[in-house]
Amino acid sequence: MEINKNHTFYKMLLAIAVPIAIQSFFSTSLNIVDSLMVGGLQEEALAAVGLANQYYYFFILIVFGICSGSATFTAQFWGNKDIKNIKRILGVVLLSCGIISIIFALGAMIMPNYIMSIFIKDSKTIELGSAFLRIISVSYIITSISFAYSASCRSIGETKAIMKASTLSLLCNTILNYILIYGKFGMPAMGVSGSALATVIARIVELILILRFVYKNKTPLNANLQELLNISKEFVIKFYRTTLPVIFNEALWSLGIIIYSIAYGRISIEAVAAIQICNAVQNLFMIVAKSISTASAVMIGNRIGENDNESVRVYVRNFSKLSISLGIITGILMALLSPAFVNLYNIKPEVKLETIRTLYVICMYLSVKFFNITMVVGFFRSGGDTTFACFLDAGTVWLIGIPLAFLSVLVFKLPLHWVVALLSLEEVVKSLIGARRIKSYIWMRNVIQDMG
């Protein structure tokens, strides 16, 4: 019986995780190519785009919070084969993400200089980043719609089409970056503004491809306007009772990461450039963790929706062991390849050395990060235990990571790699507290029983 369950487990895992991994690989690889192209201009350009993207990062993680919270419901409704309520959930998500994206887009259009000045005081970097923000703000509402449909597709196991759409859009982004940044094929050289315009066009392409798949293939998300808006006040309240902690979680966590960037900016502009490279490389290796956590959220959410608690316990044990093991293997691989990645960038030798040292520190914590993302996204959120997940995920950043970051920068004047080593201790604390919660299984509950 256990063998059959494990066979089913790995079969479902591969079906969900592999397309997500392929999509993420292309996404992250092409983002690295993008950063290489921007970095080919100057270090200020690389820092400007990296810091401007912190604002986008804050926005997209709020959107991700809404979509991630909705995935709890969609996965459980799909386990119960309730198509009507899946469409209603999608309607709530589209409205919510639309409002958030309009607010952030207006901020980026109206006061980009103020936003950039929060992160750094260098006037040239602020000027470049502001130009980038004004253009890319147009893509915010488009991106939020894509996110809503993509998250819903993944929750019902439709991952291949999302993979194809994202991959084609990112290829488009990379090609346009080359043309618009450097002025190829008769186009003017637009620098960082060209990078922003390329992103806007690529996001439009992605949305068109996703909507084409959803509606042409008559998927369960093939909802008309009436079905999307068939929502009551009570339905929305029940939705946000579970989802609001996820939104707060992502908002507080991402704000914490932005504050980390402010701390890095107090070290030097070289430290900012180094951390942007570290983030690009780390994201490439975090593909595995994101794929595992997404697969665990879908699979565990489906089983909870079916009230199959025995399978949930099997899945939790398997995903816990898998995330830690893959984290160790990935960390070793990342350490071996980090120097080669860093050498691709056109930066000063001393910046290269500090970037490699920082990447080695990140490698040390990778298995803990793998476990934590699977725990928070795959277990607690899919089980509806979103309030605890919020306190755990955001709380450790704010109570441990941020104080250690500023102490190490402002008081002890430590170099970047030591700053990252100290603030990353919050990941260790998070894993220790979360592991006890996992074993209790009090996080596992069916959130769709009273949705109606």
Image (cartoon, helix red, strand yellow):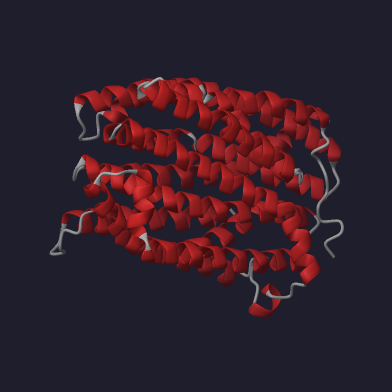
Left or right of 226 on screen, residue 42: left
Left or right of 362, for residue 442: right
Front residue of this view, candidates 222 and 263:
263
Q: State the count of labels.
A: 0
Res 444 → quadrant = top right
Residue closer to the observer: 133 or 407: 407
Residue shown at the point (47%, 28%) measured from the top left: 405
Query: Looking at the picture, how far across and down is residue 356, in whole percent?
Result: 33, 23
Query: What is the x, y in percent for residue 215?
Result: 58, 71
Report the quarter where the N terminus lies: top right
Name the image quarter holding the C terminus: bottom right
Residue at (26% x, 58% y) in the render: 193
Task: From this view, report whether residue 435 is shown above or below residue 119.
Answer: above
Looking at this rendering, what residue extends furthest in the front direction? 411
Which residue is painted at 70% across and 26% down in the image? 433
Q: Residue at x 42, y 23 (%)?
A: 411
Asked if residue 275 can be seen in this view, the reply is no
* Above or below 163: residue 411: above
Image-based side of 443 in relation to 134, left or right: right
Percent position (x, y) of residue 93?
63, 63
Residue 182 drawn at (x, y percent): 17, 54
Q: Could one spot residue 80 in this view of the protein?
A: yes
* In front of the other: 288 or 246: 246
